[in-house]
Amino acid sequence: MKRLSSLGVILLSATLLVACSSNSSSSSGAKEDVKTVQSSKPSEVKKEEPKVPMEHKNALKSAENYIATMPFSKARLYDQLTSDAGSKFPADAAQYAIDNIKVDWNKQALKSAKNYMKISPMSTEQLREQLTSEAGEKYTPEEAQYAIDNLDK
């Protein structure tokens, strides 16, 4: 009888040890998973945006103000930002503004075309020349074509 009791205690102990060890390994695995997830989140949060110089930020704000006032092509806006008669930003700050402003350049060309047609109606070719000319608005040929194609819409 003592043997049976001892054997029962040993079996019970062995069963408990096996059960505990399998729970502890799965729970330690879960802890490892949690640690992995937790350790990956701080690295995501630590990603820093590159520092943008104040001059670049100001050029972008100035470009946004110009666009809000009247339509500009990329080239003309760049000229306005860098011109001695304009904002006098350095070339790199003006280029940053051009690269980062959220503008639909086709729509800018269309606005310019509509303005021209209100002031002085002209032929399609004269309008194209005015929109793309170095002495005019400096839109790309594609932007000018978009404006011409959508003028009546």
Image: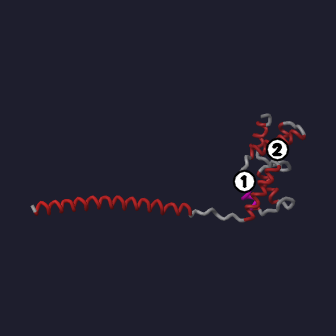
- Quadrant of the snapshot with the N terminus: bottom left
Toward the viewer: 6 or 86?
A: 6
Q: Is residue 148 above or below residue 71?
A: above
Left or right relative to 115: residue 7: left
- Looking at this view, name the residue that lies furthest to the top: 152
Disc 1 residue crowd, few under 14, some 14–19, many 20+, Cα 10 Å:
some
**Residue at 71% across, 51% down:** 102
- Report the amino acid beneath label 2: Ser
What element does badge 2 sit on?
Answer: helix
Q: Residue under label 2, please give it.
A: 112
Picture coordinates of residue 98 (x, y %)?
74, 55
Residue located at (64% from left, 63% from top): 50
Q: Which residues are magenta?
A: 92-100
Q: Is residue 99 magenta?
A: yes
Q: Provide the major secondary structure of the magenta segment.
A: helix
Name the foreground residue: 94 vs 62.
62
Residue 96 locus on image (x, y percent): 72, 59
Front residue of 12 and 21: 12
Q: Name the residue: 42% across, 59% down.
A: 33
Residue 78's image quarter?
bottom right
Position in image of residue 24 (x %, y %): 33, 61
Q: Position of residue 136 (x, y in %)?
A: 85, 48
Q: Quadrant of the C terminus?
A: top right
Answer with mark 2 or mark 1, whichever residue precedes in sequence.
1
User: 109 left or right of 121?
Assistant: left
How far separated are the C-alphas under marks 2 and 1? 18 Å
Q: Tag 2: Cα neighbours inside 10 Å, few (<14), some, or many (≥20)?
A: many
Q: Is residue 12 left or right of residue 103?
A: left
Residue at mark 1: 101
